[in-house]
Amino acid sequence: MTGMTCGHCVTSVTGAIQQIEGVSDVTVDLANRRVTVISSSGPVSGDAVTAAVREAGYQMG
């Protein structure tokens, strides 16, 4: 992910991804610019995660 620089960024992205149906846990690693998504009900769409990240004001990449 690009554009993330602080804890507020992590909170914004985490909150946005947690709104996706089926997501049970989200971990955002600011230092490595990675997000881990755990689902309680099968696969989560990569497009849905990308859209949530963009909605929070950041970019995947």
Image: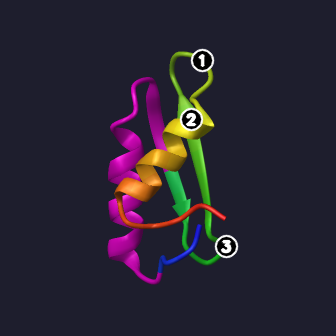
Say which quadrant the N terminus sits in. bottom right
Residue under pointer 2 = 38
Looking at the picture, tell me which residue is in the foreground, 47 or 40: 47
Question: Judging from the image, what secondary structure is the residue with disc 1 in?
Answer: loop
Residue indicated by mark 1: 42
Residue at 55% in and 73% down: 30
Label 2 vs 3, first from the N-terminus:
3
Q: Is residue 49 magenta?
A: no
Q: Label 2 is placed on what type of residue?
A: Ile
Q: Are the residues at dot 1 and dot 3 in contact (C-beta closer than 8 Å)?
A: no
Name the residue: 52% across, 16% down.
41
Question: Mark 1, residues whose alpha carbon is within 10 Å: few (<14), some, or many (≥20)?
Answer: few
Picture coordinates of residue 7, whole percent (x, y): 38, 76
Q: CA distance from mark 2 to mark 3?
A: 18 Å
**Which amino acid type corresponds to the residue marked 3 in the rendered image?**
Asn
* Relative horizontal placement of residue 11, taking residue 58 as reference (left or right): left
Relative to 18, say whether 39 is above or below: above
Q: Which residue is mark 3?
A: 32
Q: Which residues are magenta?
A: 5-26
Where is residue 19? Give x, y as percent.
33, 37
Residue at horizontal 60 percent and vertical 17 percent from the top: 42
